Amino acid sequence: MKSKNPKPMKSILSVIVLFFLSLGLNADNGHQLWLRSKSNIPVQVVSKRSSAILTIARQELQHAWQGEANQTVVLGLTREKQIKGDGFRLSAEGVHANTERGILYGVYELLRRQQTGQAIRDELVNPSWENRLLNHWDNLDGTVERGYAGHSIFWRAGNDSLTVTPEDLKLWEAYARANASIGINGSVLNNVNASPKVLSAAYLNRVKAIADVLRPYGIKTYLSINFASPMVIGRLSTADPLNAEVVDWWKNKTKEIYTLIPDFGGFLVKANSEGQPGPQDFGRNHVDGANLLADALNPYGGLVMWRAFVYNPSDEDRAKQAYNEFMPFDGQFRDNVIIQVKNGPIDFQPREPFSPLFGAMKQTPVMAELQVTQEYLGHSIHLVFLAPMWEEFLHSDTWQEGEGSTVARATDGSLFKQKHTAIAGVANIGLDDNWCGHDFAQANWYAYGRQAWDSSLSSEQIADEWLKLTFSRSLFVEGDQKVVLPMEWDLNFLKPVKQMMLNSHEAAVDYMMPLGLHHIFAAHHHYGPGPWWAPKGMRKDWTPPYYHQADSEGIGFDRTASGSGAVSQYHEPLQSQLSSPETCPEALLLWFHHVSWDYKMKNGRTLWNELCYRYDQGVQQVRQFQKVWDQAERYVDRDRFGRVQQRLRDQSLNAMEWKDACLLYFQQYSQRPIPYDLERPVNNLDDLIEKDQRTIRAYE
Amino acid sequence: MKSKNPKPMKSILSVIVLFFLSLGLNADNGHQLWLRSKSNIPVQVVSKRSSAILTIARQELQHAWQGEANQTVVLGLTREKQIKGDGFRLSAEGVHANTERGILYGVYELLRRQQTGQAIRDELVNPSWENRLLNHWDNLDGTVERGYAGHSIFWRAGNDSLTVTPEDLKLWEAYARANASIGINGSVLNNVNASPKVLSAAYLNRVKAIADVLRPYGIKTYLSINFASPMVIGRLSTADPLNAEVVDWWKNKTKEIYTLIPDFGGFLVKANSEGQPGPQDFGRNHVDGANLLADALNPYGGLVMWRAFVYNPSDEDRAKQAYNEFMPFDGQFRDNVIIQVKNGPIDFQPREPFSPLFGAMKQTPVMAELQVTQEYLGHSIHLVFLAPMWEEFLHSDTWQEGEGSTVARATDGSLFKQKHTAIAGVANIGLDDNWCGHDFAQANWYAYGRQAWDSSLSSEQIADEWLKLTFSRSLFVEGDQKVVLPMEWDLNFLKPVKQMMLNSHEAAVDYMMPLGLHHIFAAHHHYGPGPWWAPKGMRKDWTPPYYHQADSEGIGFDRTASGSGAVSQYHEPLQSQLSSPETCPEALLLWFHHVSWDYKMKNGRTLWNELCYRYDQGVQQVRQFQKVWDQAERYVDRDRFGRVQQRLRDQSLNAMEWKDACLLYFQQYSQRPIPYDLERPVNNLDDLIEKDQRTIRAYE
């Protein structure tokens, strides 16, 4: 393959024109995701071997090739030490890799570079983590926990719920292709709050059907299991992990699975957490439970991903509990166990510090669980591009092995010898035509895959790629679609829309919970504000006042030595930095400190005033996004334009509710005016509380 | 009486301090209206006669005297030709008038000037109109049509609905006192959509009880009558005005009334309008009907106020119908009949041109009906000071007798010899503690009375008076009320809040229906926007599309010669001015013209863009009002501050809905973008329409 860069304009234009001819004009349901490119420029694909994976690689090249006509591209298996796992080498010849999967990823990378105008040069490309998973919180009845894009693509309710239809197969393949194109190589098909039924023979047959579709795209299938399965499915009297019958049951069940799915990935386990059964119910501990499953899986190379999302209604700061519970077990787990830890110590908040469990255990591998679905970030209504949040997280320095011990390096095997490395993202995928509910939520699926592949990628680069792949360089005038020059498109669409994406997470933090505030959401649905919610008798670690701690003196959760002491779970010098309000990043100030309303911020404002400005800034930002999007109207088909426009309006209104709710609620404590140069609240606190109660009731 | 002006500061302050001691701190239900002043400075009131009215005049002076201690104030009856009707002469001695009522008004004027720091000099003060009425649209079951301040103060449902309680008497007296203090001398106690029952003996007894309370405050009592009363109450087979039995029935009924209420004011009649019965039901006309009643009332000096608010579902422009129907009758009415005409030709819209019936009839007197209750101006939620709207109306030039033939002069007897002159305002009063629902809606009651007394008063002067009378010059700091210097108060409270009031009507026009748009309200409740509302089969003059006439070319109702020709009902040169879009005031452009979306406005913008800017400007103005009010917090007791603050928030949200609804709806026709420097809509059109349908259903 000859690398030519930049491509001659004429060639690009002709490709684009061809591409448009294949598209319905001015209407787009978003189903094509970032896989829109299609061309009929011929290409010669050379491969000595043939297999399902290589066939797909070849088809993809032929489907979307944008290089010179009739160029030769070699797809070759090799044995190169520098290539790790799914990695590959791009060269003038084509793609070489140690595995077929590596070749497929190389092909997608090659096509992506063609489509986004990136240089294609001789290059070795290795993934950051060995296992890059999507976790689907899909229930067997077809609902999706924290899903905002329709029902499950894997499960459904009804009499024929287990029948595999042609539509199922088509959808699963489209899903697999999208994942493969961004390097995702594992899917956990069911909710971590798992029904034991998934391990029954009937359901395993459907799992096998799904696995068969995912396999040629290099994707392993995993299941979330219910720790009490031996009792519920196996009719045993116990699920005690040290009980011989239980051990046997898991061995047999695992064998049954591998008979159906030889490359089955393993189990994801939520145990002794939020009411789920676990080894503690039988007087055992996490090690006993995880090792039980690890031993069953070990003969087949399967993995256990054991979640550390545990906390009890004790007096101990919830942010400390996972660390306290897991640290004593460091080194006691089998080497096919990975502890799966949410990015922050509480629960997928708009901004959290990284969980101290990253960079804590040295002998037991830890993996990050990110949440692609926007449970706490506006569901599928708000436009919030999550890559910057994950970038911030992955590049956070744990100081575990001195400076530079980032979360990424502490989990990807760079710092510690780990047999396995992994990363997981809770999927935002459902049956909606556009998969994710919000057309821009597709960018979070995309970004998760890209960052899981390469943790050094910048959010800017990911947004740039996604926009170029997802929106066509065209102009829509009264139903007619016209090609525009890339420069015009870059200036009028790409640049402002990309900037909107890059600003969107910080905007959401500002209008929801700036300066380290967290978990002041409306109960249950976690969409709107609910800083006031604290029904009598409710366990306090489920109520916002537990987290914001507002009183007449000030606001924030004291996690220093004078408070819960959670800072002690971080390494020095980070611990000292976080311990003092002067050195603690202001973005996390109220996470770690209870400070007075008159506390002076670095910009000279009081804390109260700064809080007001931040909330207002969040609202103003969303309004700015609306302007950006409306100005992009000419460059977007009517359907997608309209969908996003409508959601931005909802987001704008909701941002105002957030601002008003939080400022008016906290003002009851601060007793200080909202600075008069700021736009005033337009919602009354009582009305917001009443509305909140209505939405909560509707949810209950 | 010695006039001293300006008053020494010390004296003012001591009065203010005394005044505060009599007030509950930091809480105010608004019931005191503008009658808050109280002092214990002694005053010597000298009056040769004694009567109920003069006793009240004396008490008011003693209650609130703020002049020199022990000054002598003479209240004297005189016979001075220059004093007209209820007029009076202020002099160094005191107050002189031809009637006791005149003396009472003089006393209120004197006290008002003391309280507001206005000069008191020798001066003759005459009222603009002889009869200054409030029309109460109160139903006998206690509900109030278009009332937004609770139920009726006169009527209630239930078994004891006709029992006069001590609370009734107290409330009616407070009502009478408030009216007297601003010169209102007549009250129509029941809705123009009148129940015949009000003329039954039982109800007339209650009317008498009310009249007895109003009388010492100089207020005459009137009733709205149902034209079919002889049939319903009198069991006659007809209500034909030329039928002898009917004539007798009305004569007897009138006699019965005057036996109970010797100073009864007369009848207000809505006939053959919106389903009400009238002479046309019996093949007769308005003259027949009005003269029937006039003849019955004539022996007692009573008046008939016959409403011209008539229109039919014909093809004729609704704006033309009242003129067409009444002009042929000019001169045929008895001289105790006055034709009562709403200010605009449609129906109390945020802005209308004056009705062409003003300055049309030369031999039959016409009176204006203003709407104090904010049916089309945000109910008791929006802060809209109506004085500027009425000022604009009263000073509109009809050109009836050449330049300067303002509506005021065409109705107050200056242009035509009229036996009687009058003006009416539809009251905004109910059982709410603060009478009007919105604390600032009290200013509209106040302003109506003041303008009815003196049509030359500026809105600015009225707002100034009202604010000084209604809000105390004090500072509220953490529950403590402190006196502030008038200069500080003037600068920080009076000036900005007055400006807010003065801007508030234009703001409402901007966010509801700028540039002459009208009647695009939600059906029935007339609160929110409903430009889309046009159910199948609905008579079209009840639907907004009839009024806005938006299409792909442009928007507006063509009332020029090429359209409905309504302009022909106006005198020259006004007719020509209105006929051309170039000379028609832009504030009325779409009232008189259907103009293209690209029509160039005087500021160079296209009509569409100007529409966008106006709507946006309305929203921005309300936000500005919120800032003004929030900054006034220190100067207002907590209760009133909070009530107004909450309503301003509601108004702000509602203004955004108006803007979004109208721009998104009209954009469907204009197909032009909202200028990108403007804040984008935050509501989706579909959601607004659905919400509208919900509120309409709730009303139905």
Image (cartoon, coloured by chain):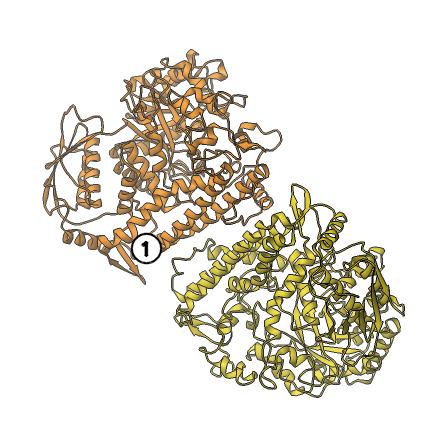
Chain colours: A orange, B yellow
Secondary structure type for disc 1: loop
Work out whether A295 lies above or below A213.
above
Which residue is nearer to you in this view: B221 or B566? B221
Whether residue A610 is visible to the viewer of this picture, yes or no, is yes
Q: Position of residue A344 (x, y in %)?
A: 41, 28
Work out whether A361 lies above or below A29.
above
Q: Which residue is mark 1?
A: A637
Q: Which quadrant: the C terminus of chain A?
A: top right
Work out whether A631 lies above or below B119.
above
Which residue is nearer to you in this view: A83 or B6? B6
Q: Quadrant of residue A475?
A: bottom left
Q: Which quadrant: the N terminus of chain A?
A: top left
Q: Position of residue A323 (x, y in %)?
A: 43, 20
Q: Position of residue B455 (x, y in %)?
A: 66, 73
In the image, what residue type sits under mark 1?
Answer: Asp
Work out whether B171 lies above or below A208.
below
